[in-house]
Image (cartoon, grey):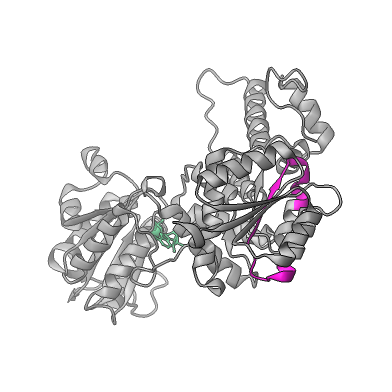
Amino acid sequence: MSGEDKFKILIVDDEESMREFLEIMLVQEGYRVTVAHDGEQACHILDRESFDLIITDIRMRNINGIGVLKKAKDVDPGATVVLISAFASAETAVEAMKEGAYDYIPKPFKVLDFKRVIRDALGSRTGPKEKGVGPKIDLHFGSLVGESPQMRKIYDLVERVSQTRTNILISGESGTGKELVARAIHSLSERRDKPFVVINCGGIPESLIESELFGYRKGAFTGALIDKEGLFDTAHGGTVFLDEVGELSLVIQVKLLRVVQDRTFTAVGGTQVKTVDVRFISATNRDLEREVIDNNFREDLYFRLNVIPINIPPLRDREGDLPLLAHYFLEKFSMEMGKDIRKISTYAMDILNNYSFPGNVRELENIVERSVALERSKIVLPDSLALSCLRERGLERINRTPDLGPEGIRLDEVMWEIERDYISRAMEIARGSKRRAAELLGINLRSLRYRLEKAGFVENDGSKGYVGGT
Ligand SMILES: Nc1ncnc2c1ncn2[C@@H]1O[C@H](COP(=O)(O)OP(=O)(O)OP(=O)(O)O)[C@@H](O)[C@H]1O
Ligand SMILES: [Mg+2]
């Protein structure tokens, strides 16, 4: 980039060292930089000149960062403004977002993070304005989001297998999108106008499953007052989705094998052999091969169902899909809730990037939904997101079946460990702000101070833990 087509940036900061530092860094990056030493000077400059990006400190004498932001939006409603804020002014940052700031960078920041926000902010100017500021999202087969090489392989497979009648076994951790993939295959196949019948193998009581699947004849058992069709009758011509197939008992596995093998079945209490035309797609989050070795799953049924295996990778292994999915859900939920949130702040995205998502896409979906519900500004800030992630993990722990072991535990020590973990994580997310950390933990500031001291996070000698902040 040279001369005229360089991006123009205005830096506003009343602290000289910071101003110089930012100027040198941005000039090195190849931007045309103008500096203002306070809000007032910035407003004068904004009256005469326009910029691609305005970076302003929030806390300044006279006219502060919000003032600069308002002025910039006044002269050009499309102006892109990024604010730099210290911990103490987190509230002001929220206010700034409401006024239409593009993003905010908390102090202290890493140079790499800073450059990323700047590039992101400038990038948003080149796209069509009203289309939002998130990445462009394509839906595959009308429902699947993600462009990672791992997911592309799956789209490819989905397309190829959809044209056949071959049975498919989809494996993957919980929440990876197994059912979505199964539905995609059905909707691409010649069977698309026929039923897609979900059989929740883990959810139907053992005593009912046979009559649910195969139907029953009048008088087959007490209460069987009329003939009733089963799920296989309903599914004729379509696709049967055997969800959580690993949950089937060995008895039912035998009955199912017959349908999978010969495509025939008999209603409970009936004699007539019925023929059915269905395609089987099964799903499991267990290692079914292992279940076969352990004699929990019939080998013959396993081979019949698993003609083509599709393994969906966990979200944490998909390169580049997280931001796409996050923005997809953001758009979906802000529309549903009638909110105008179009962006996830860079720092909020960092929190997501550092999370392992044991619940995969479903967990991400839930986190974004809650964040949108909680968010008061126009952009998802770390606060609302962190709250969701933290709550999620809290629940995970609480729901876990406690492992006492033969030796028992020391409850005080365990509770103490959990407390320490949460406190240090909350302080991390709150970037040292005790007030914010206390909010995240649902306790008051005094209680947090007391616990910090107890946990040995010394306040003022800087040797350990968290210094400063309010
Ligand atoms: N690639 C994707 N793009 C968009 N949404 C997705 C994607 N993958 C999963 N989802 C969404 O995540 C949620 C979970 O997906 P789905 O029910 O298909 O997962 P699953 O693997 O069957 O989960 P479980 O093992 O818990 O049954 C759904 O709301 C689904 O719409
Ligand atoms: Mg499922």
Judged from the image, the quadrant occupied by ligand 1 is: bottom left
63 vs 295, nearest the viewer: 63
Could you tell whether 193 is left or right of 119 in the image?
Answer: left
Residue 279 % position (x, y)? 21, 69
Task: Give the total number of marks visible in the rendering.
Answer: 0
Residue 302 % position (x, y)? 20, 51
What residue lies at 73% left-to-right and 39% top-to-bottom?
16
Residue lying furthest bottom in this view? 193
What residue lies at 80% left-to-right and 36% top-to-bottom?
470
Magenta span: 72-92
The answer to whether residue 114 is seen in the rendering is no
In the rendered image, residue 82 lying in the magenta stretch gets the answer yes
The vertical placement of 38 against 468, above or below, is below
Quick one: quadrant of the N terminus?
A: bottom left
Residue 20 % position (x, y)? 66, 40
67 vs 348, nearest the viewer: 67
What residue lies at 37% left-to-right and 49% top-to-bottom?
319
What residue lies at 67% left-to-right and 24% top-to-bottom?
416
Name the image quarter holding residue 218.
Answer: bottom left
The vertical placement of 412 against 15, above or below, is above
Residue 27 % position (x, y)? 55, 46
Could you tell whether 444 is left or right of 245 in the image?
Answer: right
Residue lying furthest right in this view? 62
The answer to whether residue 320 is seen in the rendering is yes
The vertical placement of 56 against 459, above or below, is below
230 vs 374, nearest the viewer: 374
In the rendered image, residue 98 lying in the magenta stretch gets the answer no
